[in-house]
């Protein structure tokens, strides 16, 4: 049997979920803005405080550190979803990602081709 998700433990990763004055809180606006887990907030804070620099464009120490961390995340995502590092593309959000995929597919589609999508 597969282990059940520990929802209470997962909720602890999202600070906003604990600021509910003791009432149960469910965030239902993820289609617009997802909540950010504490691990991401801490990584962003470290970036802004200690190595805020352009990625892949600077030839100085903090830019190199920013690039190293950026690529480290790419490797972690690739490992997590069992993909190649060259298959990971970072975008600003879901809309940009979907538009990028649609645009790249549109150039290859021909009349009569079928596009299958899930809900």
Image: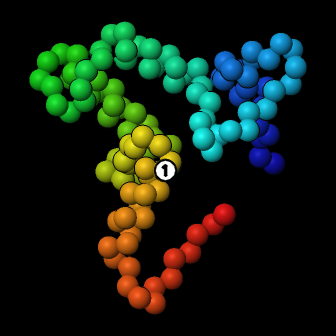
At horizontal 24% and vertical 26% (from top left) the residue drawn is 54
The spot of residue 29 in percent (x, y) is: 68, 38
Q: Relative to residue 66, is residue 105 drawn left or right?
A: right
Figure check: 83 above or below 76: below
Judged from the image, the secondary structure of the residue bearing numbered disc 1 is helix
Instruction: Judge whether residue 38 can be spotted in this image.
Output: yes
Q: Position of residue 71 (x, y in %)?
A: 32, 34
Quarter holding residue 7: top right
Q: Residue furthest right?
A: 23
Residue at image coords 28%, 27%: 68
Q: Is residue 62 left or right of residue 22?
A: left
Compare residues 34 and 85 and report the one nearer the observer: 34
Specify few, some or many for label 1: CA neighbours under 10 Å numbering under 14, 14-19, or 20 or more: few
Seen in the picture, residue 3 relative to 111 is either above or below; the reply is above
- In the figure, 83 relative to 7: above or below? below
Which of the 4 quarters of the picture holds residue 99? bottom left
* Residue 75 visible in the displayed image: no
Residue 113 lies left or right of residue 19; in this view the side is left
Q: Nearer the viewer, residue 3 or 107?
A: 107
The structure residue drawn at horizontal position 58% and vertical position 69%, both measured from the top left corner, is 117
Residue in view at x 67 percent, y 18 percent: 15
* Residue lying at the far bottom of the rendered structure: 112
Where is residue 80 shown, x and y percent of the image? 50, 43
Residue 110 at x, y = what percent?
A: 38, 85
Residue that carries the numbered disc 1 in the rendered image: 95
Quadrant in which the C terminus is drawn = bottom right
């Amino acid at each position: 049997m597969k282990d059940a998700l520990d929802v209470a433990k997962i909720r602890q990763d999202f600070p906003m979920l604990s600021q509910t004055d003791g009432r149960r809180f469910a965030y239902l606006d993820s289609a617009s803005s997802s909540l950010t887990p504490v691990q991401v907030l801490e990584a962003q804070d470290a970036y802004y405080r200690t190595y805020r620099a352009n990625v892949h464009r600077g030839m100085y120490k903090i830019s190199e550190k920013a690039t190293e961390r950026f690529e480290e995340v790419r490797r972690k995502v690739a490992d997590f979803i069992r993909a190649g590092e060259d298959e990971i593309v970072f975008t600003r959000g879901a809309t940009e990602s979907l538009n990028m995929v649609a645009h790249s597919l549109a150039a290859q589609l021909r009349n009569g081709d079928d596009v299958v999508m899930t809900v």
